[in-house]
Image (cartoon, rainbow, N blue to C red):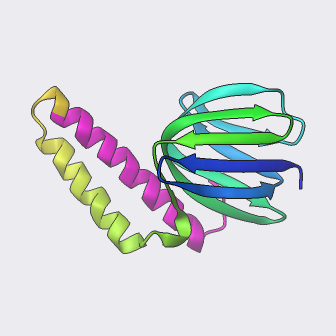
Amino acid sequence: MGLNIRVIAPDRIVWNAKAEEVILPTSTGQLGILSGHAPLLTALDIGVMRVRITNTWTSIVLFGGFAEVENDEILILVNGAEEASVINLDKANKELIESSSLLNEAKTNKEKFEATQKLRKAKARVQAANTLTNQSIY
């Protein structure tokens, strides 16, 4: 295993394990990291992080943050995170529908922003939960 990955949220250590590959949801798109990657610091968007250990992919929803890559160490500081294994797909789909309705009903800029963030989180949760039943990484 080539990468040491740590995901830290304000309230807990979400992930601390070795892996062969990680795909991060950055503010400019998905970023794949393998052993020997050049050092970098990147902003993370709301989305699904995928981690490959041998031939198994694990998904973790990240709610924005930053990632630092250096010497096969990946430190990920996030506002919040949720492992796909604890997400109830039915509940996540319901939240997706509700947040979509909330966005349609939003009137002020603040309401629109908050509803958009909630919708993005709901989409990421559904995407991550779906990876449990379908091992495709996309």
**Quadrant housing residue 19:** bottom right
Q: Estimate the x, y position of residue 27 in percent, counting from the top left.
A: 53, 30
Which residue is found at the position 67% from the left and 26% from the top? 41
Which residue is found at the position 51% from the left and 46% from the top? 47
| Stretch of the chain drawn in magenta | 111-138
Q: Estimate the x, y position of residue 57 in percent, counting from the top left.
A: 71, 62
Image mark count? 0
Residue 45 visible, this angle = no
Q: Nearer the viewer, residue 80 or 61?
A: 80
Which residue is found at the position 46% from the left and 49% from the top? 80
Q: Estimate the x, y position of residue 70 in percent, counting from the top left.
A: 80, 32
Residue 10 visible, this angle = yes
In this rendering, position of residue 47 left or right of residue 42: left
Image position of 17 with respect to 113: above or below: below
Q: Quadrant of the N terminus?
A: bottom right
In this rendering, position of residue 112 left or right of residue 52: left
In the image, farthest residue toward the front: 11
**Quadrant housing residue 35:** top right
Q: Examine the residues drawn in magenta and state their main secondary structure.
A: helix
In this rendering, position of residue 85 left or right of residue 69: left
Q: Estimate the x, y position of residue 16 in percent, counting from the top left.
A: 70, 56
Which residue is found at the position 49% from the left and 71% from the top? 86
Q: Nearer the viewer, residue 87 or 133?
A: 87
